[in-house]
């Protein structure tokens, strides 16, 4: 279970972006979080991904409360969660070819021997050809780079996926391909998904249930 309870978070304690928000994702479940731009969805997603310590509230991951965040979190916690951000060019090292971008988490966790097999497997899953893997971010489209970022998020076989506006900047065909890749992974792994976005039609089609941002304070949420 991934459970966020009564979360208050932001970048200035005097003016939190998120106040008293809560969301729960069960293993294997896909939950959509719907809300307008600027409402705080991305901040809550970063809390769920263990990338941002909340000012108040609790995060429980696989039955245990989270007490450490970012690089201070135990490796088993960090690698349990994969995250894909809205803007791939802000989350990708511009110096790395896509093959090294995908392999980053493997190398950071001492799993270099798995690099060739996992990169080839995931490149096929997300629709990247060998010639694209040799290119750097400035040499590929936003959609191609986001495919690589999704592969990077999946490379350590996480039990939980956080997709924060993953398809907001992409065309319909790339959106469909990335959603299909996520669903293929979830079907094979049983991973839970928190998909954040502002496209209600997409979230309703993709997810088992969709929560509306205005209603996730406290523990009661309206579903669509």
Image: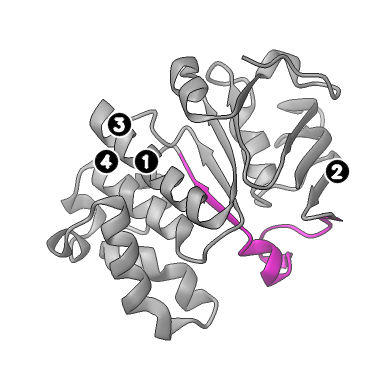
Q: Give the camera-side residue of 146 and 159.
A: 159
Residue 8 position within the rendered picture, expressed as x and y whole percent measured from the top left: 81, 32
Residue 92 position within the rendered picture, expressed as x and y whole percent measured from the top left: 38, 54
Q: Earlier in the sequence, mark 1 or mark 4?
A: 4
Tag in front: 1 or 4: 1
Determine the residue positioned at 54% across, 29% down: 207
C-alpha distance separating marks 2 and 4 = 35 Å
Quadrant assignment for the C terminus? top right
Disc 4 marks which residue?
Answer: 142
Determine the residue positioned at 58% across, 52% down: 190
Q: Say if the magenta span includes residue 84.
A: yes
Tag in front: 1 or 3: 1
C-alpha distance separating marks 1 and 3 = 14 Å
Tag in front: 2 or 1: 1
What segment is highlighted magenta in the picture? 64-85
Mark 2 neighbour class, 10 Å CA radius: few under 14, some 14 to 19, many 20 or more: some
The answer to the question of whether label 1 and label 3 lie on touching residues, with beta carbons closer than 8 A, is: no
Secondary-structure class at tag 4: helix
């Amino acid at each position: 279970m991934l459970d966020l309870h009564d979360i208050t978070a932001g970048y200035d304690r005097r003016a939190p972006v998120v106040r008293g928000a809560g969301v729960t994702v069960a293993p294997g479940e896909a939950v959509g979080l719907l809300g307008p731009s600027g409402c705080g969805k991305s901040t809550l997603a970063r809390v769920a991904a263990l990338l941002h310590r909340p000012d108040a509230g609790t995060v429980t991951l696989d039955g245990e409360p989270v007490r450490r965040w970012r690089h201070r979190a135990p490796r088993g916690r960090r690698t349990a969660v994969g995250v894909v951000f809205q803007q791939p060019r802000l989350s990708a090292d511009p110096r790395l070819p896509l093959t090294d971008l995908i392999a980053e988490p493997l190398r950071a966790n001492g799993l270099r021997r798995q690099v060739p097999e996992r990169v080839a497997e995931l490149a096929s899953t997300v629709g990247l050809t060998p010639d694209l893997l040799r290119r750097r971010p400035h040499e590929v489209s936003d959609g191609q780079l986001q495919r690589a970022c999704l592969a990077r998020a999946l490379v350590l076989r996480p039990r939980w996926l956080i997709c924060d506006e993953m398809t907001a900047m992409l065309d319909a065909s790339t959106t469909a391909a990335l959603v299909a890749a996520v669903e293929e992974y979830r079907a094979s792994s049983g991973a839970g998904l928190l998909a954040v976005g502002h496209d209600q039609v997409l979230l309703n089609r993709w997810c088992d249930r969709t929560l509306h941002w205005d209603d996730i304070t406290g523990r009661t949420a309206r579903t669509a």
